[in-house]
Amino acid sequence: MPELRPRKSLMNPEIRRRGIYILPNLFTTAALFAGFFAIVQAMNDRFEVSAVAIFLAMVLDGLDGRVARLTHTQSAFGAEYDSLSDMVSFGVAPALVAYEWALKGLGKMGWIAAFIYCAGAALRLARFNTNIDVIDKRYFQGLPSPAAAALVAGLVWVMIDNGWSGEEARWYACVLTMFAGITMVSSVRYYSGKDINLRKSVPFIIVVAFAIGFALVSSYPPGVLFALFLVYALSGYVLAAWQLVGRRRKPVRPE
């Protein structure tokens, strides 16, 4: 008589279907929706709304990771979902917004610039996912895709707010879009801020600085936000140049 094997219970944790954490993935979904909304509005020639939606996606993308860490709900699914959402919100959406607003007037050069940005975002995200356990967490390798998206969207927003048309700003948009795309896949290092512990006490002047920062942004959001991300995008090159000069000035010790 054949030996009877016990049936595996559906409650067995080894075969039970895995669920997903709802809270951090809600923020990721909201960021994805903001990126999709930016694309839809760009197709309807509402480019200022598109730019604001990309900035909103950036805020939501920053929150999902924080929420996951604070609530101990990190997961492999959440990491993959976040990466796919970033590709839409910070890869496809800014490239399409820039193309529809200004770059399509440049013909072949326009869609090449948009593709350079889009491909740069995809390569940047792929490299980040594969090197996440290797690189120094204090620095990003290459310009982060949310910062690159904010750079492109900020240009669109500030130009429209100052009465510039896409045709008038097309060469500025072309240069900045390609700069953002190439910088994303460069080896230039950018400070990540991940070593900042929000649970520790800070000097009072830090709180004052944050208050002044919020006041500046609220005074003229398009210009201040664009200036902040432009400075951040250039800071990596300044840091690289500083380190290069420091290495050349370092005296060689005789053996």
Image (cartoon, grey):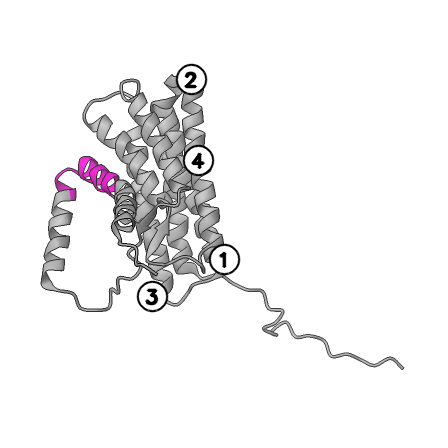
Separation of marks 4 and 1 at Cα, in angstroms: 23 Å
Q: Between residues 65 and 31, which one lies in front from this camera angle?
A: 65
Residue identified by numbered label 4: 118
Which SS class for mark 2?
A: loop
Query: Residues at badges 1 and 3 in contact (C-beta under 8 Å)?
Result: no
| Quarter of the figure with the C terminus | bottom left
Separation of marks 4 and 2 at Cα, in angstroms: 17 Å
Separation of marks 4 and 3 at Cα, in angstroms: 32 Å
Image mark for residue 77? 1
- Residue at point 38%, 18% (across, down): 106
Of the image marks 4 and 1, the number of the one nearer the N terminus: 1
Amino acid found under the numbered disc labelled 3: Leu
Which SS class for mark 1?
A: helix
Separation of marks 1 and 2 at Cα, in angstroms: 40 Å
Of the image marks 1 and 3, the number of the one nearer the N terminus: 3
What crowding class fits label 3: few (fewer than 14 Cα within 10 Å), some (14-19), or many (20 or more)? Answer: few
In the figure, 124 relative to 67: above or below?
above
Amino acid found under the numbered disc labelled 1: Phe
Of the image marks 4 and 3, the number of the one nearer the N terminus: 3
Amino acid found under the numbered disc labelled 2: Gly
Separation of marks 1 and 3 at Cα, in angstroms: 17 Å
Residue 250 place in picture, x, y as percent: 26, 53
Residue identified by numbered label 2: 107
Query: Residues at badges 1 and 2 in contact (C-beta under 8 Å)?
Result: no
Q: Between residues 8 and 32, which one lies in front from this camera angle?
A: 32
Q: Which residues are magenta?
A: 217-231
For this view, does 15 lie left or right of residue 209?
A: right
Which SS class for mark 3?
A: helix
The stretch drawn in magenta includes residue 226: yes
Q: Between residues 95 and 38, which one lies in front from this camera angle?
A: 95
Residue identified by numbered label 3: 70
